[in-house]
Amino acid sequence: MKALFLKALVGSVLIAGISYAEDFKPNGSLGVTQTFYGNSGKYKTESSHPSAVLNYNFTKAWSLSLQWDRVWNMYNYTNGENEQDNSFSGPKATLSNNYGVLGNTKIKWSSSLMVENEAEFNNSNQTYILAQTAFDFLEYIPKGEYIQATQFAFSPMYVYGWSTKGASGHLNTGVLSLLTNWQLPANFTFKFNTYLFREWYEGSFEISSSNQSYKTANYFMILAWLEYSKELYKVNEQTSLVFNFAGGFDPYISSNRKAAGWDPFISGNQMYEWLNPTVSSGDYKSTYALFALPQLEVVYNYSQDLSLSVFAQVKYSNQVWGNTEKDWKLQPQGGIGITYNF
């Protein structure tokens, strides 16, 4: 659910790796963005979204990421028809370790531990712990003339969540995922991730459908999106106009349970874009969100360490998901961003 600028800033904490240069010095980056979302046709999705991300590499192997997102409704939300409640606060911290290669193999091993608190200001609050490890077999993937893998990792994950405010409950989630990234011709990149996971519920985390509650559920999820970036015009040595694009499934997800409105934590954690579809339609076992997001961005590099960004973009996606995916609407978006490297 992340916007283009934020996605580029955060990157992949777990897999991206840390410089192993002999003259390594601790380093980091601080990024702040302010994004505004307009209404999606008849759907009220108008929101303000400030975000701050601090990344710091302590050593060649250890890094820490601190992120905070806060979203406000920019209209008087009344829980009426076609209204989306985007009042949300989500601070999180991720500690990552890049172990390097395993023994005499070419397999790169890395792990991370994330803690996130989610508050939706509806008298409920949840905290989640996500433990993840990944084994990247990139060096074993043949390089084609036109297509090259930049990541091919098998990644087990485990999630534990509990209610920290409101009705009591907790969940456990076991995940097995395949995380891949591909470099395509003409500066296109393609991400294709698959996830198999099972959740166990207690109390307030139980899902229900047709007056029946479930204590377990199995899921299959795909995240797949195409990305493109090109400098359109260089104003001067410091300023340029850039075109960015992202689009694809965000996500496709299916389950063995008919559970109205389910949205597993791992889905929201791994998704690309804010915001979700507005309306969940009935009981469903499979659904998808499909989006296209072109962006124009003006980047001003004040110095080697400080850059400013102003961007305007429009998202095209389905506003209804569940039994039926429909109501494809345009949503204008825009904002500013600042990145400081130190």
Image (tube, rainbow, N blue to C red):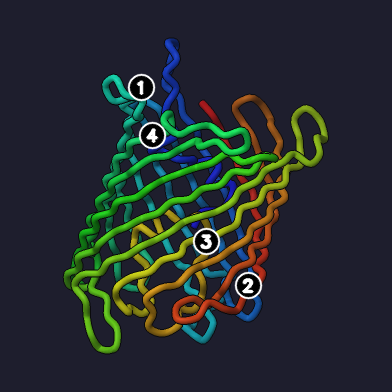
Q: Position of residue 141 (x, y in %)?
A: 45, 34
Give the residue at mark 3: 249
Mark 4 touches mark 3? (CB < 8 Å): no
- Foreground: disc 3 or disc 1: 3
Q: N-terminal of the two: label 3 or label 1? A: 1
Q: In this image, 324 relative to 120: left or right?
A: right
Q: How far is mark 1 from mark 4, CA to CA?
A: 24 Å
Q: Name which quarter of the figure residue 259 lies in.
A: bottom left
Secondary structure, mark 3, is strand
Q: N-terminal of the two: label 2 or label 3? A: 2
47, 2: nearer the viewer: 2
Numbered tag placed on residue 137 in the rendering: 4
Numbered tag placed on residue 59 in the rendering: 1
Q: Name which quarter of the figure residue 213 lies in.
A: bottom left
Mark 3 touches mark 1? (CB < 8 Å): no
Numbered tag placed on residue 39 in the rendering: 2
Regarding residue 226, the answer to whether it shows in the image is yes
Q: In this image, 287 relative to 298: left or right?
A: left
Q: In this image, 266 relative to 249: left or right?
A: left
Q: N-terminal of the two: label 4 or label 3? A: 4
Q: How far is mark 4 from mark 3, CA to CA?
A: 24 Å
What residue is at 24 percent from the left and 55 percent from the top?
174
